[in-house]
Structure formats: structure tokens, C-alpha cells
Image (cartoon, helix red, strand yellow):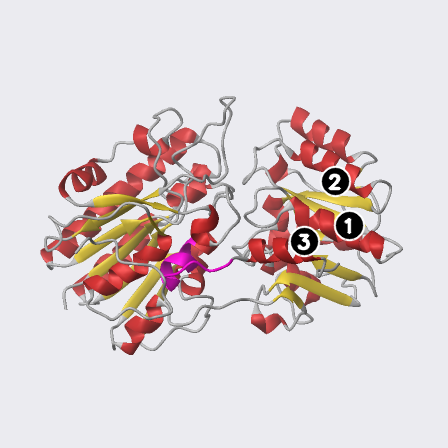
């Protein structure tokens, strides 16, 4: 069988303006040549096109889920919004943000109101500061809104930058700093949250990197907690530290025995914790259909996006399907932020893919993390370098696949690196609502036409058409290739 490779460029959107556009400013000879010679179109990757509320930017989790499932899956944010509006949701630890990627401030506000309604005697709010899916120095706005919402009910007890509280790469030294602030009250003791954040800004420390600021009580035996982040990947490590009796990430000097700990969504089914909104797992996803056909498939990415090209791409299924092989390439750990190493582990990911192609692997599903992860640093020059690295890697993979008379499909899960400046000329570190590319590289389909108006749900049906595999009736997406 001639090989098929899906390349997901994480955080790689389409934007006409060159200003602050790392893609337009980068030297990309391979992509330029591909776009001149092969059919391409754009796909919607945000809002209702990926099961989110209108105007909400996409993210890696929902992007990969939509790509792999071939349908629009109603996302946790929308489900939670509807439940809160219905008055059926209840129970405070999480990201204070309106970014809509990991959490949403409206959910926190609803929890505060419901705690008031239920006459909860003491409500302590432990806020993680964003600065990544929101402007880098914007948390004062959110803190003031939260204080207004509280109206002398409850207290903000801890502020911590998400760099420490929301790691997902087992950098336990960061998580330990957040944990000890929540449990031991370790941190810079202050009186006024807004003023304390301003002092951090004065020292050129932005929201994401603010070390723990402590204003009140810590988590103690018998307390109940709700982690209101709805996206699992950056909530898992702190949840483990707070709840797992066999936790070994770092030494816990204190470990309170909580009366109850509720996860907003299912962070990991092995945790055995109460879940406010159990997952909706789509059936008959791309990887499952490939497996049923007896096709070997190879899923690979570096650490930062490994869960996305496996768990999320497979519809929230953790175990591999029969015939599915996975390869995790470690992300660099020697740097604090990836602008210091914009190539990340792209070369190693590429090398692994080339070896599998040489070995005759028929289907490869891969992710390049660089455009998204480096763009989150807000450093434009480094992001340009990241795009150039990826362009070279794409060139090698495409050359090898075409030599074997195969097909390469390039797309993205959401936008990011195409918009690196905000309206004031400052760094823009968040995802965008812009469309993403879809490129079909194959001598067989070189003269084919692709329809416009598609979304990420149409990627899997297009793959199935190319591989001549019947589309599952559960998939609502449609092939992008015009007959």
C-alpha cells in the first residue's frame, strides 16, 4: 500500500496581514512550493465548527477530537454553559480567565452564586493567572470582575501563575510550588490581590509566571474542593498531587484528607474522583476504522502534543486500537519557555516518521507542536524560526512520501502563530478564531478540486475517501474532494 501521512501543524492559522504573522514573515520554500502545485483550501477550527460557543477560539483538544472523530462533538464548555443556565450545576480551584480554552470565568462566577444560594459558610478561591490564552498582563481585569461578583462573599486566598499550577510535562518542581501554596500557604503573603499583581507587573513579571501570592486560608483536612478547569491535560498533575495517596512526583510535607474533590470534567478515568460532567466519547472514530481494516497506523508527537495525537484524536480513548503504534518524543526540558529552543523536538519527530516510511508503514498521523508552543511565548522572532524549522521537516516528509507514490495531508487544529501582535502592538499569546489550512499533496490528486466552507470534521472523511474505506454513519463530516 502507498503511504498516507496526516501532518497536523499545531496553532497554524491563515491570516492575510503580514504584520505580526510568523508564517508570512518566515522563509518557507517547501510550503510555498506545495501551495503552488497542489490543491488546498481553508477549514473552520473555532466556535460552533468544533462544538464550542460562537466566537470561542479553538484549541488542541477540541481540534484533534474533531479531526479524529469526523463530526462536531458538543464540547464541555458548551455543555457546562447550558447546565449553568438551567440551574442544574453545583460547587474553588482553577484558571481565572475568559479564554475558554481551559476554563471560563463565567463558570467560576456561577459556582460562587450557587455557593451563596446553598449558604456555604466559607468559600476560598484559589486562582491561577492566565496570560497565555489572554493578554500577558490582563489578570487585574478578571480579579476585579471576580471581586465584584463575590460582593463580600468568600475570599480570594491564592494567586498563582499557570506556569506553576498547570504544567502537563511532569515538571514536578513547578507543580510543587503551586501545591505548597494551596496546602501550606507558602508564598508571598499579601493583602490586596490587585495591588500584588501590579507589583509583579512593575517587576516585568506577567500573569503566567507570577509566583504564589497568598491572602488567606489554605486547604485542610475535611475541606471540599472543585477544580473548575474543564480541559483535562493541564489539570491532571495538580489533581494527582492533591488527591492521590500513592503520589510520587515530589515529597508532600502536608497532604490534607479532603472530604470531597470534584473535577469539572473527567481528567483521567483512573483517578476515581467525582466528575461534574462525564465525557461524551464519540464512537467509530478514524483510528478505529483504520484498525478494523487491518491497517497499521503510527501516531507520533513530542510530549507537549502527544495526548492530542493519541487520546484526543482517538475520541477520548486511551488504549491504542489493534494495529496502532505510538511514539512519544520527549519535549526539551532544559528550557523554561520554548522561545529559547524554537526547534523543540521537531527533528526527532521527523526522523521517526522517515524511518517508519522506509519500513513500509501505511498510515502515519503526526503533530508538530512548534507553531503553537513557541507562539505562546509571545516572541515573534522565535516563532518565525519555529515555522522555518517545520517547513524544512515538511519538505523531507513530503519528498519521501511522493517517492513512494503516497499522499500527505497537511492541516491544523487551530490558529495561533499567524497573529503574534494584539491591537496595541503588544504580544498576542492566545489562540485565534481564524481558519486553518488544508493541503492535499499527492500526484494522484494533483488536479483535484477541494470545496470551500469546510471544517475540521471533514478531515477524517477525506482521509477515508483517499484510503477507500467506507465512512462510518456516525461521522457527519464530508469529504473535501469534489467528485
Q: Dot 3, how many residues are within 10 Å of its Cα: few (below 14), some (14-19), or many (20+)? A: few
Residue drawn where x is 52% and y is 57% of the image: 75
Which of the two residues, 210 or 435, is positioned nearer the viewer here?
A: 435
Whether the magenta-drawn stretch holds residue 68 is answered as yes
Indicate which disc residue 112 carries.
1
Residue drawn where x is 38% and y is 44% of the image: 370
The residue that label 3 is drawn on is 85
Question: Would residue 12 be found to the left or right of residue 109 on screen?
Answer: left
Which of the two residues, 108 or 4, is positioned nearer the viewer here?
A: 108
SS label for mark 3: helix
Indicate which disc residue 176 carries.
none
Residue 243 drawn at (x, y percent) = 69, 66
Residue drawn where x is 42% and y is 50% of the image: 49
Q: Which of marks 3 and 2 is nearer the N terminus?
A: 3
The residue that label 2 is drawn on is 146
Quarter of the image with the C terminus in it:
bottom left
Which of the two residues, 397 or 119, is positioned nearer the viewer here?
A: 119
Q: Dot 1, how many residues are within 10 Å of its Cα: few (below 14), some (14-19), or many (20+)? A: many
Residue 237 drawn at (x, y percent) = 60, 59
Question: Would residue 293 be found to the left or right of residue 455 on screen?
Answer: left
Residues rendered magenta in the picture: 63-74
CA gap, disc 3 and disc 1: 14 Å
Q: Dot 2, how many residues are within 10 Å of its Cα: few (below 14), some (14-19), or many (20+)? A: many
Q: Which of marks 3 and 1 is nearer the N terminus?
A: 3
Q: Which of marks 3 and 2 is in front?
A: 3
The answer to whether residue 331 shows anywhere in this view is: no
Q: Residue furthest front?
A: 86
Amino acid at each position: 500500500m502507498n503511504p498516507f501521512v496526516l501532518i497536523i501543524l499545531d496553532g497554524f492559522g491563515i491570516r492575510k496581514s503580514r504584520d505580526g504573522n510568523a508564517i508570512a514573515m518566515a522563509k518557507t520554500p517547501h510550503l510555498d512550493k506545495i501551495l503552488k502545485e497542489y490543491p488546498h483550501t481553508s477549514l473552520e477550527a473555532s466556535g460552533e465548527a468544533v462544538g464550542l460557543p460562537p466566537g470561542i477560539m479553538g484549541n488542541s483538544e477540541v481540534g484533534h477530537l474533531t479531526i479524529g472523530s469526523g463530526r462536531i462533538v458538543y464540547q464541555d464548555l458548551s455543555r457546562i454553559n447550558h447546565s449553568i443556565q438551567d440551574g442544574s450545576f453545583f460547587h474553588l480551584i482553577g484558571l481565572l480567565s475568559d479564554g475558554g480554552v481551559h476554563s471560563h470565568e463565567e463558570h467560576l462566577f456561577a459556582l460562587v452564586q450557587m455557593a451563596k444560594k446553598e449558604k456555604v459558610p466559607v468559600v476560598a478561591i484559589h486562582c491561577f493567572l492566565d496570560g497565555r490564552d489572554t493578554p500577558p498582563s490582563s489578570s487585574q481585569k478578571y480579579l476585579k470582575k471576580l471581586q465584584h461578583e463575590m460582593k463580600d462573599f468568600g475570599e480570594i486566598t491564592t494567586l498563582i501563575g499557570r506556569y506553576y499550577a498547570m504544567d502537563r510535562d511532569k515538571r514536578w518542581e513547578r507543580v510543587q510550588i503551586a501545591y505548597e501554596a494551596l496546602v501550606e500557604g507558602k508564598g508571598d503573603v499579601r493583602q490586596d490581590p490587585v495591588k500584588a499583581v501590579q507589583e509583579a507587573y512593575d517587576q516585568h513579571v506577567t500573569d503566567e509566571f507570577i509566583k504564589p501570592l497568598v491572602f488567606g486560608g489554605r486547604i485542610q483536612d475535611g475541606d471540599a474542593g472543585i477544580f473548575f478547569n474543564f480541559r483535562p491535560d493541564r489539570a491532571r498533575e495538580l489533581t494527582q498531587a492533591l488527591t492521590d495517596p500513592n503520589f510520587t512526583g515530589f515529597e508532600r510535607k502536608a497532604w490534607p484528607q479532603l472530604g470531597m474533590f470534584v473535577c469539572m470534567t473527567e481528567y483521567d478515568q483512573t483517578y476515581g474522583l467525582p466528575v461534574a460532567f462525564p465525557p461524551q466519547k464519540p464512537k467509530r472514530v478514524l483510528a478505529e476504522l483504520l484498525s478494523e481494516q487491518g491497517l497499521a497506523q503510527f501516531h507520533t508527537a513530542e510530549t507537549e502534543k502527544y495526548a492530542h495525537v493519541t487520546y484526543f484524536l482517538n475520541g477520548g480513548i486511551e488504549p491504542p486500537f489493534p494495529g496502532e503504534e505510538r511514539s512519544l518524543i520527549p519535549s526539551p526540558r532544559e528550557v523554561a519557555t520554548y522561545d529559547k529552543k524554537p526547534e523543540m523536538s521537531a527533528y526527532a519527530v521527523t526522523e521517526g516518521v522517515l524511518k517508519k516510511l522506509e519500513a513500509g508503514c501505511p498510515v502515519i498521523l503526526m503533530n508538530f507542536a512548534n507553531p503553537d508552543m513557541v507562539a505562546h511565548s509571545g516572541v515573534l522572532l522565535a516563532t518565525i524560526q519555529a515555522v522555518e524549522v517545520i517547513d524544512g521537516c515538511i519538505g523531507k516528509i513530503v519528498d519521501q512520501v511522493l517517492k513512494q507514490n503516497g499522499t500527505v495531508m497537511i492541516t491544523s487544529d487551530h490558529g495561533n502563530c499567524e497573529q503574534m501582535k494584539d491591537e496595541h502592538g503588544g504580544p498576542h499569546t492566545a489562540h485565534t478564531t481564524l481558519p486553518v489550512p488544508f493541503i492535499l499533496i499527492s500526484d494522484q490528486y494533483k488536479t483535484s478540486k477541494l470545496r470551500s466552507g469546510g471544517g475540521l470534521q471533514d478531515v477524517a472523511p477525506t482521509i477515508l475517501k483517499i484510503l477507500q474505506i467506507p465512512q462510518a454513519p456516525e461521522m457527519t463530516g464530508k469529504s473535501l474532494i469534489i467528485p
